[in-house]
């Protein structure tokens, strides 16, 4: 069996469901909110390339390298973004949470906090991960602050790591949360959501 397997994760604000082409139109509408593909330091597809992006993520899944999710807003029932488990290392029980983007109107809301809480809970408590990574562009200060607010620690910077969407070389910041830190991080995220016990579920 693949590790991890596709799964649906349910919370109060957001549902993470296995990515399929059924969410294509929602994702096209979502990426147009804020014209997210124009952010030069990220890899967010423009609307006309969304089908190819879904195909690419599903191909990565078939190869055992990723598990992509559609981020579904519970209030509207529409997909408002995408996130993935990436760089899966089953032997060492490590993975990355990345390739995450949300339409502009839901950014900096409880939806993102709950999304990360569900992904981390599943990773540490169901998949028994020893560490979960987050990676972002050195100059993406918004993303770096968001990762640090989760409680992740900076492991280091991979200099001239890869090319950005505009062709410039990117320095990549690598953050992680390790298993021994998870209980404190979980309490912190629950506190940020304003409740002591999150109503999370999976199927």
Image (tube, rainbow, N blue to C red):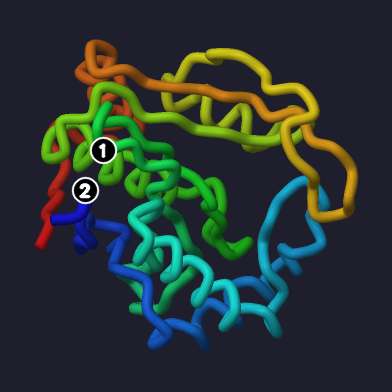
Name the residue at 73% across, 32% down: 161
Between 136 and 199, the one lying in front of the other is 136
Crowding near the residue tagged with mark 1, few <14, some 14–19, many ≥20 C-alpha atoms within 10 Å? some
Q: Quadrant of the C terminus?
A: bottom left
Residue at 48% from the left image edge and 15% from the top image edge: 153
Total count of labels: 2
* Residue 162 point in image, percent of width and height: 74, 39
Q: Percent from the top left, x then y, of residue 151?
A: 42, 20
Residue 151 placement, left or right of 7: right
| Depth check, front residue: 168 or 17 | 168
Numbered circle sitting on residue 116:
none
Instruction: Give the alpha-carbon distance from disc 2 to disc 1, as whole Å.
Output: 6 Å
Up the image or down, 141 lies above or below 188; here it is below
Q: Earlier in the sequence, mark 2 or mark 1?
A: 2
SS class of the residue under badge 1? loop
Give the quarter of the image for residue 9: bottom left
Quick one: SS at disc 2? loop
Q: Residue at x 68, y 68 (%)?
A: 45
Q: Which mark is residue 3?
A: 2
**Horizontal and vertical percent for residue 158?**
68, 22
Residue that badge 1 annotates: 90
Residue 105, x across and y down, in percent = 59, 63
Residue at position x 37%, y 68% from top? 73
Q: Is residue 27 above or below residue 41?
A: below
Q: Nearer the viewer, residue 156 or 56?
A: 56
Q: Would you say the residues marked 2 and 1 are in contact, meaning their CB atoms lie under 8 Å apart?
A: yes
How many residues crowd mark 2 within 10 Å: few (<14), some (14–19), many (20+)? some
């Amino acid at each position: 069996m693949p590790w991890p397997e596709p799964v649906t994760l349910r919370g109060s604000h957001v549902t993470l469901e296995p990515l399929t082409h059924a969410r294509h139109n929602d994702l096209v509408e979502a990426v147009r909110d804020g014209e997210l593909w124009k952010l030069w330091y990220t890899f967010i597809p423009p609307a006309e390339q969304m089908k190819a992006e879904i195909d690419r993520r599903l191909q990565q899944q078939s190869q055992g390298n990723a598990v992509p999710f559609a981020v579904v807003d519970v209030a509207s029932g529409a997909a408002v973004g995408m996130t993935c488990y990436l760089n899966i290392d089953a032997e060492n029980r490590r993975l990355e949470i990345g390739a995450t983007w949300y339409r502009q109107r839901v950014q900096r809301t409880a939806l993102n906090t709950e999304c990360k809480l569900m992904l981390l809970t599943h990773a540490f408590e169901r998949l028994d991960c020893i560490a979960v990574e987050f990676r972002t562009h050195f100059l993406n200060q918004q993303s770096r602050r968001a990762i640090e607010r989760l409680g992740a620690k900076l492991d280091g910077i991979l200099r001239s790591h890869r090319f950005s969407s505009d062709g410039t070389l990117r320095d990549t910041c690598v953050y992680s949360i390790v298993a021994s830190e998870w209980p404190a991080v979980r309490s912190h995220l629950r506190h940020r959501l304003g409740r002591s016990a999150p109503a999370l579920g999976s199927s």
